[in-house]
Amino acid sequence: MTINVSAPPVENEQEALTLMFYHLQLAAMYFEATPEMISYTDVPDTFTTAPMWQWLQSMDALYAEEDK
């Protein structure tokens, strides 16, 4: 499964792990600033791939648990 994003390659698995967590922190920060309801029509076609949409749904579910 891929989301078809181009980026420079990493040198090793540790660098990939560090970069992944850094970008997940950024993604969570931006997720917290988004509208509560997001639909496919709100985002460009390049971001409506199944993995991206699944990530969004997973984040939504995690934050919903926090509110309980």
Image (tube, rainbow, N blue to C red):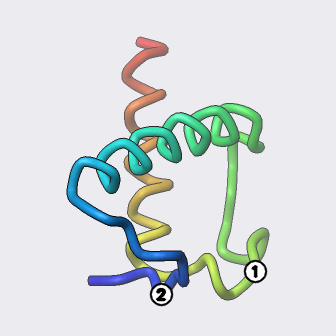
Examine the rendered structure and indicate whether residue 54 appears above or below residue 26: below
Label 2: which secondary element: loop
Q: Name the residue at the top extreme.
A: 68
* Lower sequence index among marks 2 and 1: 2
Q: Three-letter amino acid code at disc 2?
A: Asn
Image quadrant in which you'd find residue 50: bottom left
Q: Position of residue 17 (x, y in %)?
A: 29, 48
Q: Position of residue 21 (x, y in %)?
A: 40, 40
Q: Position of residue 38 (x, y in %)?
A: 68, 57
User: In whole angstroms, how far apart are the C-alphas of marks 2 and 1?
Assistant: 14 Å
Please give the name of the residue rendered at 58% of the width and 79% of the height, measured from the top-left corner: 48
Residue that mark 2 sits on: 4
Please give the name of the residue rendered at 39% of the width and 63% of the height, measured from the top-left corner: 54
Label 1: which secondary element: loop
Q: Name the residue at the front extreme.
A: 11
Q: Position of residue 36 (x, y in %)?
A: 69, 40
Please give the name of the residue rendered at 49% of the width and 39% of the height, measured from the top-left corner: 22
* 20 and 68: which is toward the camera: 20
Q: Residues within 10 Å of mark 1 (few under 14, many from 20)?
A: few
Which label belongs to residue 12? none
Q: Is residue 10 left or right of residue 53?
A: left
The N terminus is located in which quarter?
A: bottom left
Examine the rendered structure and indicate whether residue 47 appears above or below residue 66: below
Q: Three-letter amino acid code at disc 1?
A: Pro
Q: Is residue 62 left or right of residue 35?
A: left
Residue that mark 1 sits on: 44
